[in-house]
Image (cartoon, rainbow, N blue to C red):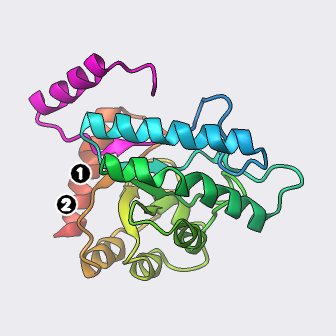
Amino acid sequence: ARDVTPERRQEVRAQAADAGLDVVGLHWLLAKTQGFYLTSPDKAVRKATTEYLKALAQLCGDLGGGVMVLGSPQQRNLLPGVGYSEAEKYAAEVLRAAMGACADHNVTIALEPLGPAEGDFMLTAESAIDLAKLVDSPHCKLHLDVKAMASEKYPIDVIILDCRDWVVHFHANDPNLLGPGMGEIEYGPIFAALKQIDYAGWVSVEVFKYEPSPEQIARQSIEYMRLMEA
């Protein structure tokens, strides 16, 4: 993030605007970085992580974005000797210290629960809300991901309804790693629940397989979601 010059930020923002696109925000915030960890017992690492989140908030705002989705399981999983409640305390400390920068740049960090296949910290929407409550800021909210919710014990639409006061961003996908409507998940109840809670944020398609092509996946996903939303 720090390597992106002010000139480059302006250039990218202008390119998006010229193409008629909105920059929603940033994702994979800590992936492929060195020295940052959300739940580290090392105070210096936690401080460095906070400072990097502040830099990301400025980048996000400079690009015109408003949401930073915090997934990055490899930078939050429990470290040896660190219990869950201790890790949660460390994560809250890191995030709370970044809230001022988020407010300054009108950016919200959206905590992303991920299933047990991805890690062992913040596996459910409920646990993400618990962490957000510890942070206690309007700039720390919740991101929901369909693939991740499919690993929970509750129906996806019920989870959405229970999270009505917290969710600010949403990923549409499937446990088969493709887009909405391309696997086992039925999206009718999902869009009905989003409508019931008056969700006004973005629904972004996140896939991890790109066959037959990204363009085809995007086209099919949009068509299917419009059908489900009708």
Say which residue appears at 66% left-offset and 51% top-offset.
Answer: 118
Vertical comparison of 36 with 182: above or below: above
Residues at marks 1 and 2, CA–CA distance in whole angstroms: 6 Å
Secondary element under disc 1, as helix, strand or loop, is helix
- Specify few, some or many for label 1: CA neighbours under 10 Å numbering under 14, 14-19, or 20 or more: some
Vertical comparison of 200 with 203: above or below: below
Estimate the x, y position of residue 228 in percent, counting from the top left: 24, 67
Q: Amino acid at mark 1?
A: Ile
Left or right: 41 in relation to 224: right
What number is the disc on residue 64? none
Please tell me which residue lies in front, 198 or 30. 30
Report which quarter residue 188 is drawn in: bottom left
The residue beneath circle 2 is: 226
Please tell me which residue lies in front, 10 or 209. 10
The residue beneath circle 1 is: 222
As for residue 19 lying within the magenta part, the answer is: yes
Left or right: 10 in relation to 144: left
Estimate the x, y position of residue 135 in percent, counting from the top left: 54, 65
Report which quarter residue 27 is drawn in: top left
Vertical comparison of 178 with 31: above or below: below
Secondary element under disc 2, as helix, strand or loop, is helix
Disc 1 to disc 2: CB gap under 8 Å: yes
As for residue 17 lying within the magenta part, the answer is: yes
Estimate the x, y position of residue 16 in percent, counting from the top left: 18, 30
Write down the region rendered in magenta: 1-29
